[in-house]
Amino acid sequence: MGRQPWVIYGLMKTSKAPSLVGPGYVSTTLVGFTLLYGALAAVDFWLMARNGRAGPEPGGDEAEEAGAEPALVY
């Protein structure tokens, strides 16, 4: 068999099957994905900062609301 001698066994060699994607398409896709993930990261950091500044919600656990004392853990 050898090491990848054909794209389609016995019909087409790998030297006859190049990709037709040009450098413009590759760079456009790279820039697009970079902008998309950059925007998602910015929204993620903004949401984390907003919720971090707000702090935890008042009330806590249901055990504290029911009047039970917290268990001592060593």
Image (cartoon, rainbow, N blue to C red):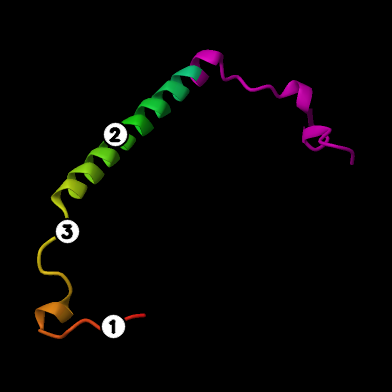
In the image, residue 41 lies in the stretch drawn in magenta: no
Residues tagged 1 and 3 counted as in contact (Cβ below 8 A): no
* Sequence order check, earlier mark of 2 and 3: 2
Mark 1: which amino acid?
A: Leu
Residue 65 vertical placement versus 57 (above, below): below
Element class at badge 2:
helix
Mark 2: which amino acid?
A: Ala
Mark 3: which amino acid?
A: Pro
User: In the rendered view of the protein, which quadrant contains the C terminus?
Assistant: bottom left
Residue 53 vertical placement versus 30 (above, below): below
Residue drawn where x is 45% and y is 24% of the image: 29
User: Badge 2 local density, few (<14 within 10 Å), some, or many (20+)?
Assistant: few
User: In the rendered view of the protein, which quadrant contains the N terminus?
Assistant: top right
* Sequence order check, earlier mark of 1 and 3: 3
Number of the label disc, if any, that sits on residue 42: 2
Which residue in the structure is indicated by mark 1? 72
In the image, residue 7 lies in the stretch drawn in magenta: yes
The residues bearing labels 2 and 3 have C-alpha atoms spaced at a distance of 22 Å
Picture quadrant where residue 60 is located = bottom left
Element class at badge 3:
loop
Picture quadrant where residue 19 is located = top right
The residues bearing labels 1 and 3 have C-alpha atoms spaced at a distance of 22 Å
User: Badge 1 local density, few (<14 within 10 Å), some, or many (20+)?
Assistant: few
Residue 17 vertical placement versus 64 (above, below): above
Q: Give the range drawn in magenta.
A: 1-26
Q: Which of 49 and 8 is in front in this view?
A: 49
The residues bearing labels 1 and 2 have C-alpha atoms spaced at a distance of 41 Å
Residue drawn where x is 17% and y is 81% of the image: 63
* Sequence order check, earlier mark of 1 and 2: 2
Which residue in the structure is indicated by mark 3? 56
